[in-house]
Image (cartoon, grey):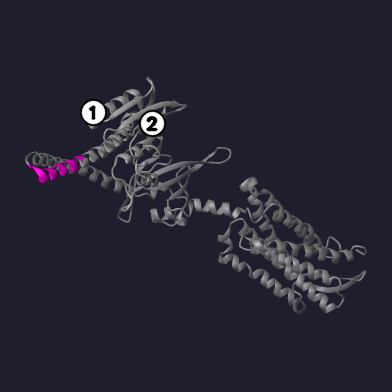
Amino acid sequence: MVGAVPWLALGSFASGVGSLYLLAQLRDHWDKPGAKWFVATIATITVWCGTYGVAVLVSTPLVRRGLEAVTWVCLVWIGFFFLAFALGYTGRTTILESRLFRGLAAVPAVASLLALTNPLHALLWDGVRLTTVDGASLVQYTFQPLGYVVVFVAMLFVVFGTVLVFDTVISYGPLYRREAIAVGLSPVPPGLAVLVWALGIGPTANLTTLAFLPHIALDAYAFVRSDMFEFHPATRRAGERAAIDDIATPVAIVDVDGRIVNLNPAAERMLAVEKRSVLTDPLDGLLVGEAFAVGEAYDRFAVENGGRRDVYKVQQTELRDESDTHLGYTVVFQDITDEIQRERRLEVLNRFLRHNVRNESVVIQARAELLAAELDGDEADHAATIERAVDRLVESGDKARTLSEASVDADDVEPVDLRERVADVTSALAEEYGGTVDVDVPAALTLRTQPVLLGVVVTNLVENALQHVPGAAVSVSAHADGDDVVLTVADDGPGVPDHELSVLARGRETDLDHGSGIGLWLVHWAVQTLEGDLDFDTSDGTTVTVRLPRDRAVASDPAAA
């Protein structure tokens, strides 16, 4: 030790300067997960290194013993701070903020008190001897059993923290690997130095402060080079927790036999149970209502809870490990009670509109025709106005009924000769409204789609032009473009008003901003259902471009569109 002692003070101060540098780098990351505890850890290292560097240069017995007690205080707190950092950094904030962990702080607090008052009771060490080697003051003493316990507990905190950090490497793979390995390895050198010192199997001097040099180097690499607090596993762990615990949808995790392994709070409320009391219980035994089978999917599944009957759509997904072993199921209950109630209300409203409103409109229409035929002058004009308004109302009802009656099952997708379909629609409309419709669709241009909805698109686009532009010239053309068919309907009218198009683009109407009819909405919904794209160009008349897939193999619900 004769030649190495001067380097002990120099090395201690070097470690202290390195830790101060790291503290300076942490000033902009104070609010990151675990950062405050990491700062506390590095600050404790700074105090330890500075204190010990001064201590080996002090020969006054009382002062030297006091500085030795300060190093013990740093020793007992550094493990606690590092464990707290590991909990915060890896996202285990529930444990970090628990009463149990806060109570654990009593361990280093009591140990600190014992270290500072050790001259009075000698419970941690006894038989203090001061030696001077080349002007450096060293302290030797005999560890008491309680002293070994204090050192062991401090080291145990560090070990637990290191395990938590390395668990991140195992659990999350390469995402946080560099940071976690560097921070996890950093306590190893000083930890080994403490053990060598406490067990008395090394040199007389405590070399822990020298061992902090690689510790600081690894932490600096993790922080400066690898963005330790820019990318931290707390984000992913919180996301994993939120994916189950924080969502409003009930989720149950069960094993292959349907026994409960985990429930999120929403599932606890749905089942009216507490998770702890039902773990390992069969899930089907808690579902009051219909019979439940593990591994099956349910379009509708009723659950009775407190006299209320809620309806859910149940989706069960197999849980498998990396070796593809089937471990159980994730059971998700999607509450569709309100959706079913809205569906039933819409069914009633639809029947009312289809029958009652239409029947009454026909009566009004017939009477208006009689009045228009019998009256003269202004009275006849009034009757004609009523007749036209009722015509528009009946027409809108027919259009709405057409869409509601259009089946959306996959079986209704069939080959359609586009030229034939367009010709049938446009000839009838040209005869009804007047004007001219030019059709330029190649022969044998066929697509697999829903013919009813395709007719809704062509009918409403051509009708919109003929209705609003007397004597309009309308052209309908189509061509194949790869896997799509592009259908274009153009007219020479004034163009669709911007506010009509803005309503379609927004996807909803308001009291102050709405369309004047249902025709463009029918086109919008039908094209979405057919999995196509719709584009309007009003720079010169109106040109509507509809792009549809040539082979629509999967049908979807227009109500969802």
In this view of the protein, can residue 39 be seen by the observer? yes
In the displayed structure image, the side of residue 443 where residue 518 appears, left or right: left
- 40 and 280: which one is in front? 40
- 206 and 362: which one is in front? 362
Q: Residue at x 44, y 53 (%)?
A: 278
Q: Quarter-wise, where is residue 119 in the image?
A: bottom right
In the displayed structure image, the side of residue 223 where residue 290 appears, left or right: left
- 188 and 378: which one is in front? 378
Q: Which residue type does callout 2 highlight?
A: Thr
Which portion, as a residue range, is magenta? 375-391
Q: Residues within 10 Å of mark 2 (few under 14, many from 20)?
A: many
Principal secondary structure, stretch drawn in magenta: helix
The picture places residue 76, in percent across and down from the top left corner, at 71, 67
- Residue picked out by circle 1: 431
Q: Quarter-wise, where is residue 6 in the image?
A: bottom right
Q: Residue at x 20, y 44 (%)?
A: 352
- Residue picked out by circle 2: 488
